[in-house]
Image (cartoon, helix red, strand yellow):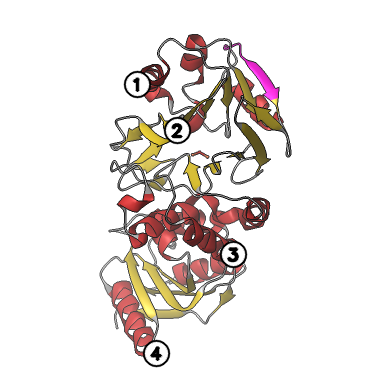
């Protein structure tokens, strides 16, 4: 489906590409690939919204040409500089040198830094600015730090479409074009995974975006990754409102651990049983089997985070260290956390895990440690 042009409404086409094979997105595991979405809006003037990643540039230009034939692109709206959305700029500008790129002032700086050898026309826009293309007009809604300084959404008022770039995105590269092709559970699971691994540190900025779009009549959200949202608009906005406040489910716990000879695993299983008996929904995540970005998504709504590591060479296991470094950077808040683990003689790992949990600002529960075995 996504190998083809996606007709979104009269004169609006999805011309993005599917990256079904990507499994690692700057350190974040993408188990079912992703898409780099781009949209063509054909009015008296023709507008392209966002580019795609560089390796897909030729395929992208071919798709644009299949819609436009020999017509030119008048405007390009660059909602975000990150190379998954701007990488094809040099190739597109070579084909359409007259196109004027519209984006935030930070976008201009970023594009000039990334593509110093490319000459392009740029019009810096700010909140409240409009771009008329004939029958249609675009409204620009900068959303700094959702999730880069240059990030912006664009609203097409006549069609009630929000081109939201990374906001409301999901890494889904299995071919579906619209959310109605997925169950609500499938859609929200991928959106949650994306939020936890990309957007989570920026709750305050997400709140500002939600406030800005609250007044808009939105019938379609066209994000820069994953499926176009029509059916689940209320649900995804409800979820973003919950996540951006760092709200959690007080009945959910995740237990993230690695193990050497099985004792820390036994401790994890014991904790899991204890909490399940108390009525908690518990998920056990063994870092030898699951990537830390998977763990991150699972703890998005969990009130309790248990982190377990045996002591290896006077340290915690490297896998646990990687998880903690990653989690700390994504700044989950309002959690209670507990360090646990086993050891043979020195036992430093549990205290090290505890210190990092403390530095995350969590309410830290008493450490649980055992020597050799339980
Ligand atoms: Fe999808 Fe921030 O790039």
The quarter of the image holding the C terminus is: bottom left
- Mark 2 vs mark 4: which is more N-terminal? 2
* Left/right of residue 98 with respect to residue 54 in the rendered view: right
Ligand 1 within 8 Å of the CB at mark 4: no
Q: At x 30% / y 46%, what residue is drawn?
A: 32
Decide: few, some or many residues near mark 1? Use Cα within 10 Å; few <14, some 14-19, many ≥20: some
Cα distance in 3D space between marks 1 and 4: 54 Å
**For discs 4 and 3, the disc positioned in front in the rendered view:** 4
Q: At x 69% / y 22%, what residue is drawn?
A: 123
Q: Pointers 2 and 4 in contact (CB under 8 A)?
A: no
| Residue position marked by numbered label 2 in the rendering | 10
Q: At x 30% / y 30%, what residue is drawn?
A: 4
Cα distance in 3D space between marks 1 and 2: 23 Å
Cα distance in 3D space between marks 4 and 3: 26 Å
Tell me residue 94's x, y (percent). 50, 10
Q: Is residue 108 above or below residue 176?
A: above
Tell me residue 39's x, y (percent). 47, 31
**For discs 3 and 1, the disc positioned in front in the rendered view:** 1
Tell me residue 161's x, y (percent). 53, 42
**For discs 2 and 4, the disc positioned in front in the rendered view:** 2
């Amino acid at each position: 489906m996504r190998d083809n042009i996606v007709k979104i409404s009269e004169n609006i086409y999805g011309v993005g590409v599917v990256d079904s094979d990507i499994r690692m997105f700057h350190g974040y595991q993408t188990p079912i690939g992703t898409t780099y979405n781009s949209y063509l809006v054909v009015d008296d003037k023709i507008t392209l919204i966002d580019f795609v990643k560089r390796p897909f540039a030729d395929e992208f230009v071919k798709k644009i040409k299949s819609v436009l034939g020999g017509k030119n692109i008048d405007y390009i709206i660059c909602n975000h500089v990150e190379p998954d959305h701007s990488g094809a700029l040099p190739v597109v500008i070579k084909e359409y040198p007259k196109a004027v790129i519209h984006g935030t002032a930070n976008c201009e700086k970023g594009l000039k830094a990334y593509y110093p050898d490319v000459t392009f026309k740029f019009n810096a826009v700010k909140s409240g600015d409009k771009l008329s293309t004939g029958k249609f007009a675009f409204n620009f809604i900068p959303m700094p730090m959702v999730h880069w300084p240059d990030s912006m959404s664009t609203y097409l008022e006549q069609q009630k479409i929000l081109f939201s770039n990374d906001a409301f995105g999901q890494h889904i590269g299995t071919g579906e074009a619209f959310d109605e092709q997925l169950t609500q559970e499938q859609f929200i699971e991928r959106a949650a995974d994306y939020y936890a691994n990309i957007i989570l540190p920026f709750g305050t900025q997400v709140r500002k975006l939600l406030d800005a779009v609250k007044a808009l009549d939105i019938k379609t959200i066209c994000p820069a990754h994953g499926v176009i949202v029509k059916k689940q608009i209320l649900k995804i906005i409800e979820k973003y409102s919950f996540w951006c406040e760092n709200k959690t489910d007080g009945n959910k716990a995740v237990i993230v651990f690695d193990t050497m000879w099985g004792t820390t695993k036994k401790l994890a299983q014991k904790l899991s049983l204890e909490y399940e008996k108390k009525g908690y929904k518990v998920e056990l995540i063994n870092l030898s089997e699951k990537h830390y970005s998977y763990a991150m998504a699972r703890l998005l709504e969990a009130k309790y985070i248990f982190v377990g590591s045996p002591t290896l060479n006077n340290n915690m296991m490297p896998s646990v260290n990687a998880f903690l470094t990653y989690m700390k950077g994504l700044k989950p808040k309002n959690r209670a956390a507990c360090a646990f683990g086993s050891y043979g003689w020195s036992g430093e790992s549990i205290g090290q895990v505890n210190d990092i949990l403390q530095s995350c600002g969590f309410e830290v529960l008493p450490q649980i440690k055992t020597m050799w075995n339980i």
